[in-house]
Image (cartoon, rainbow, N blue to C red):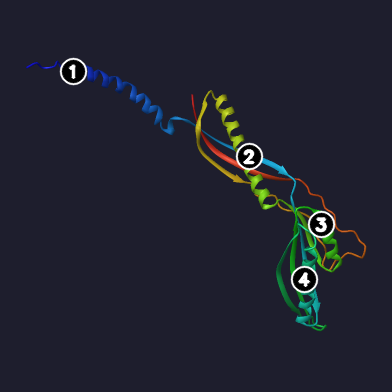
Amino acid sequence: MRLSPRLPSFRAPAFALAVALIAPGLASAETKPEETYTRLDISGSGSVQAAPDQLTAHFRAEGRAKTAAAAQQAVNTLVHKAVEQSGKTSGIKAAVLQYSVSEERPDKAPASWTASQSLTFTAPDGSGLLPLTGDLQGEGLILEDLSWSLSPENQKTLKLDAEKKAVEDLKKQADTLAASLGLHVVRFAKVSISDGGYPRPVMLMAMPARAGLADGAPPPSSTAEVQTVHASANATVLLAP
């Protein structure tokens, strides 16, 4: 009976030794602990500007009378007419808000009742809202303020753009500072982003109580000033030679 010759036993150990010499190097490169890197903490910022796309007029309808019923009737009539009038102009959104009634008892005068309700009108521009504002002032409504702001949809878009700029600022700083240290950026170990809050509405005017427009007086005017949305970012960057 013939037996096939066996392979020399030294080949397997030699192959295993070769693998053992290569594998540790690969493993160390892939699992190198963060403590061995140089850590760099940086902060960045970004901002974008845009014209406001929303104009809002805040009104208060007020009625005073000897009885609560009469005061409320006066307010209800003012509000109903205002909302009905706003519906004749496309693009204007009306919101009828808080309602209150109170009694006043002065020492040397008969008691009286005051009823009031707040309402707002919002439009993408002033072409229709400003004339309406003047008309409602003439009807006896009190214009408390007129303000430009960014719409919620525009705010979201601008916030994302500002955050992108903040991250770009981080990357630029990391590359520049790493090069000045004779190192390179391995990766970002930690990144946090926060917005700087949305710009507050730009208040244009506040009318004193019971102010109104005389017949033939022009409506209020306004200028939509550019607004800025800010974002900031912080990061920890790992550097190596």
The amino acid sitting under disc 3 is: Gly
Q: Nearer the viewer, residue 189 or 4?
A: 4
Mark 1 lies on residue: 9
Query: Of discs 3 and 2, which sits in the foreground?
Result: 3
196 in relation to 112, above or below: above
Horizontal placement of 28 versus 179: left or right? left
The image shows a total of numbered marks equal to 4
Q: Which mark is residue 80?
A: 4
The quarter of the picture where residue 66 lies is bottom right
Q: Which mark is residue 180?
A: none
Quadrant of the snapshot with the N terminus:
top left
Q: Position of residue 228 (x, y in %)?
A: 71, 45
The amino acid sitting under disc 1 is: Ser
Q: Say few, some or many: other residues with alpha carbon within 10 Å of mark 3 (under 14 / 14 to 19 / 20 or more).
A: some
Q: Say few, some or many: other residues with alpha carbon within 10 Å of mark 2 (under 14 / 14 to 19 / 20 or more).
A: many
Mark 2 lies on residue: 45
Horizontal placement of 158 versus 77: left or right? left
Badge 2 marks a residue whose secondary structure is strand
193 in relation to 34, above or below: below
Badge 3 marks a residue whose secondary structure is helix
Q: Nearer the viewer, residue 92 or 194?
A: 92
Mark 3 lies on residue: 128
Q: Say few, some or many: other residues with alpha carbon within 10 Å of mark 4 (under 14 / 14 to 19 / 20 or more).
A: few
Q: Earlier in the sequence, mark 4 or mark 2?
A: 2
Residue at x-position 9% and y-position 16%: 2
Badge 4 marks a residue whose secondary structure is helix
